[in-house]
Structures are given as structure tokens and as C-alpha cells.
Amino acid sequence: MSGPLHRAGYVTIVGRPNVGKSTLLNCLVGQKISITSRKPQTTRQRITGILTRKDAQLVFVDTPGFQDRRNTALNRLMNRSVISSVQHVDVILLVIEALKLDKRDVELRELLPQPVPLVVAINKIDRLRDRNLLLPFIQSVHERFNGAALVPVSALKNSGRDELVNALAALMPAGPRLFDEDEITHSSERFLAAELIREKLFRVLGDELPYAAAVDIAQFETHGNLRRIYAEIIVDKESQKPIVIGKKGEKLKTIASRARADMEQLFGSKVFLEVWVKVRSGWADDERALKRLGYDV
Ligand code: GDP
Ligand code: MG
């Protein structure tokens, strides 16, 4: 008596800025998650979401460097550690915009490790005035990205979601679930606060971002319609501190004020946010610290 084949594996979403990666992840998995009990893993990647179906489990992981870097960073993407971080996934999901195949999309594709199967989501199809333009576009993408599965979607309108999940699942190795429901907790406001600060760090510092930078929420208090949040950006070396802080504290101020604005919107409350930069030398090698910061070790 054998049921249908179950598949499970890791996916990473890549693509140039603003193509809709975050929106698509949200459309695929709904809520961000965190893992309560960890198994040893082959990657040091952060899990950003898990989609569990009867027949498949897709675990979405972050690949720092491919995500939010500026275009000028393309050369740096050749950086070995970044390349190797995408090598450990089972499928790469490349997001592009409908009718807007860009030089950067093609360059990015060339940097991806060839042996890892590729699915291309052609996003924002809801914006098309003329549906007839989609087919020739798909054809041209097909010619460029030979061998990749192409799926038109609208992350915003939730359309093409099942087709995309099917395409990803089909490329996963056969095997049981990697995580059980009871290991997964939906992320708290605390987790989301750290995520938002982390995102601003990426955006504000771009190429300058120290590799080992991490965010820790030291304190999170709710008083009626006010959240008081004390966060720490942790770097590895004293010399990285001024990079994050910037001239006259400019960079840190920008990071904190943008993160605060997003938090107020997300939590629907006033937010008092203080962000400090701390040096913890060698933290990246400290397994316990990594776990606390939400990395998989
Ligand atoms: P990321 O930088 O790749 O993570 O892109 P985001 O997910 O932040 O999306 C960038 C912008 O595109 C946002 O304003 C989204 O609302 C918008 N967007 C994302 N997906 C879609 C879509 O399917 N249709 C439309 N019309 N807009 C979208
Ligand atoms: Mg994003």
C-alpha cells in the first residue's frame, strides 16, 4: 500500500529589486515562520517560510547577497560564498516582471549555478493591458532561459499560485517532510521587527553591509497602542561599526526611521524604536548566538 509520492526540499527566491519577491513569498506561504526545534542542516540559510501540502513541503530560504543588493553588486555576486549558498537549495525560483525582461535578469540567471533546477515566475501579469502580449513574451523568455519551467503569476492577485507550487514541487527530491507542524511557529511581531530592520540594513548599506551583520531584538514591550522596541545590530568587528552607523550617525538613523515607519504600518500602532550597533567578535562562529538570531546551524 503506497500513497502518492511525497516531495520535499529547499527553494530560494532570487530576482532584481521590485520584481515582487517579497509579495510572492507572502502569496506562497502567507505568514513568515520560525522553527522551534532545529535539525542539523546542510545550509546556514534562514528559513523565511514553509508551504506544506499533502504531497509536498517547500521550505523557502534566504540567500543573502542575491536578494537586496544593488545592481552594481552583480560582479560581487560572483563571490564564492554567495554562489555556494544557492548551490545548497533544490530549486531556484527566479522572479521577473511580465514584458520587462531586463539585462539584469539575464545577468543574474548566468550567475546561478547551472545544476540547480530553475523555475521562472513571470510576475505582475495582472498589469497587462493586452493578454495577447504574454505569449510572445513567454516565448522570448523560453529562448533566453532554456530549460527552465516558466509560470505566469500575479503575486498581488494570487493568480497562478497553484501552477507555480506544482512546478516547484515537481522538481523537489522525493522524501518525507523536513519539518513537522509542531516545529513551526508563526512569526511574532518581535520576529517581524527584526526582519524589517534587517531589510533596511540591506537596502541602506548595499554593498557595504558586513557579511556577518545580524539583528537581535533585545526588548519588545507593548503598552496599549505603543510598542517600545530596543534592537541591536550585531557586527563581527569593531571596524564594521562605523560602516553601519555612518557619518554623524546618518546611516543608522535612516535604517531606524525607515524600519520604524514600516513597523507602525504593520502593527497599526505607534512605535518607539531604538537601534544600537554592538560588536560581538566571532559571533558568527558561535552556534548558540546563531540560533538565537534565527539562523540555522
Ligand atoms: P521585491 O523587491 O522583489 O521583494 O518586490 P516587492 O515584493 O517588495 O514588490 C515591489 C512592488 O511590486 C510592490 O509595490 C508590490 O506591491 C508590487 N507587486 C508585487 N507583485 C505584484 C503583482 O503581481 N502585480 C502588481 N501589479 N504589483 C505587484
Ligand atoms: Mg523584498
Image (cartoon, rainbow, N blue to C red):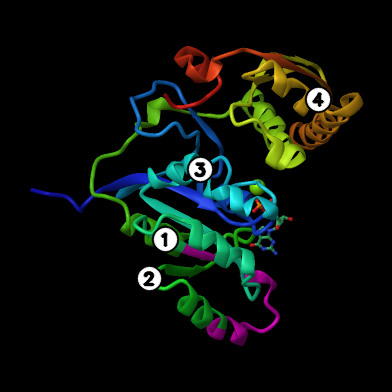
Badge nearest the viewer, 4 or 1: 4
Q: Residue at x 46, y 79 (%)?
A: 143
In terms of image quadrants, where is residue 242? top right
Q: Name which residue lies at 55% across and 15% down.
A: 283
- The residue at which mark 2 appears reads as 147
Secondary structure state at the residue bearing disc 2: loop
Q: Is mark 3 within 8 Å of ligand 2?
A: no
Respond yes or no on whether mark 2 lies under 8 Å from ligand 1: no
Q: CA distance from mark 3 to mark 2?
A: 23 Å
**How far separated are the C-alphas under marks 4 and 2?**
45 Å
130 in magenta: yes
Compare marks 3 and 2 and give the one earlier in the sequence: 3
Q: Which residue is mark 1?
A: 118
Name the residue type under label 1.
Leu
> Are discs 1 and 2 less than 8 Å apart at CB?
yes
The residue segment tinted magenta is: 120-136
Which quadrant: the C terminus? Answer: top left
Q: Position of residue 65 (x, y in %)?
A: 58, 43
Look at mark 4 in the image and give the residue it sits on.
245
Question: Disc 1 beta carbon < 8 A from ligand 1?
Answer: no
For image coordinates 64% across by 76% down, the residue present is 99
Residue placed under numbered mark 3 in the picture? 82
Q: Is residue 131 placed above or below 96 in the rendered structure?
A: below
- Residue 117 lies left or right of residue 192; in this view the side is left
Q: Position of residue 24 (x, y in %)?
A: 58, 53
Q: Amino acid at mark 2?
A: Gly
Classed neighbour count for the residue bearing mark 1: other residues with Cα under 10 Å, few (<14), some (14–19), many (≥20): many
